[in-house]
């Protein structure tokens, strides 16, 4: 996976997990997360309460079974087990994050398993409003995109404690945390949340 050194800040940019097709799966070991204001065109997105909308940047270590791509810009590929990637979480997925954390008694531990499987999509009009019903067939997603329609792909987020067989991923998550904290990272604001 491409990891890019940012010459302006001296930080490192890690690939962002994408949801591009129905049936993709992501499984990762939690490393750390940061909360930030959502930005659009460099300005905070304001919610209905008049406050900046929030999103999470969640760093994880990719685990076996992942089929979702990750990347920076146009450089996108399926991450290998052990690769550090980021999830950008906002909107409904942010709510799911909170619910899942509450189920874990609000404590997020290195190596907790974060995952999703995409199972539906939604086409959108140019103003951001939904266009038609929920889509559950990848052929329909492809057809809509061929017409230039924006399509979001979705699947419920899950967080759980690792199993005994997944304990080696806790060690890799600990190593990744040391890697992430040994120098600055860059949370660029143009990553697309899911």
Image: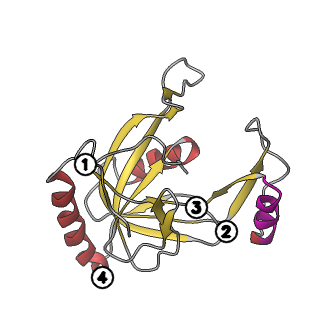
The CA distance from mark 4 to mark 1 is: 34 Å
Q: Tell me, yes or no, if residue 136 can be seen here.
A: no
Residue 22 x %, y %: 67, 68
Q: Earlier in the sequence, mark 2 or mark 1?
A: 1
Q: Earlier in the sequence, mark 4 or mark 2?
A: 2
Q: Earlier in the sequence, mark 4 or mark 1?
A: 1
Mark 4 or 1: the one toward you: 1
Range covered by the magenta-colored residues:
139-148
Residue named by callout 3:
19
Q: Secondary structure at mark 1?
A: loop
Taking the image as shown, residue 62 lies to the left or right of residue 12, namely: right
Residue named by callout 4:
165
Residue 55 x %, y %: 45, 40
Taking the image as shown, residue 190 lies to the left or right of residue 3, namely: right
Q: Can residue 57 be found in the magenta stretch?
A: no
Q: Secondary structure at mark 2?
A: loop
State whether the magenta stretch is mostly helix, strand or loop: helix
Q: Secondary structure at mark 4?
A: helix
Residue 22: assigned label: 2
Q: Earlier in the sequence, mark 4 or mark 3?
A: 3
């Amino acid at each position: 996976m491409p990891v890019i050194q940012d010459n302006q800040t001296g930080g490192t940019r890690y690939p962002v997990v994408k949801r591009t097709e129905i049936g993709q799966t992501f499984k990762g070991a939690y490393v750390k997360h940061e909360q930030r204001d959502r930005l659009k065109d460099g300005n905070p997105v304001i919610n209905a309460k008049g406050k900046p909308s929030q999103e999470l940047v969640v760093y994880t270590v990719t685990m076996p079974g992942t089929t979702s791509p990750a990347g920076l810009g146009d450089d996108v590929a399926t991450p290998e087990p052990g690769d550090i990637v980021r999830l950008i979480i906002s909107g409904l997925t942010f709510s799911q994050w909170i619910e899942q954390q509450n189920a874990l008694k609000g404590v997020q531990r290195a190596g907790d398993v974060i995952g999703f499987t995409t199972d539906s999509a939604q086409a959108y009009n140019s103003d951001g409003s939904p266009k038609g019903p929920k889509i559950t067939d990848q052929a329909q997603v492809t057809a809509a995109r061929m017409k230039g329609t924006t399509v979001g792909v979705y699947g419920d987020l899950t967080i759980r404690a690792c199993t005994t067989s997944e304990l080696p991923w806790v060690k890799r998550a600990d190593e990744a945390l040391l890697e992430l904290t040994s120098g600055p990272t860059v949370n660029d604001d143009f990553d697309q949340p899911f």
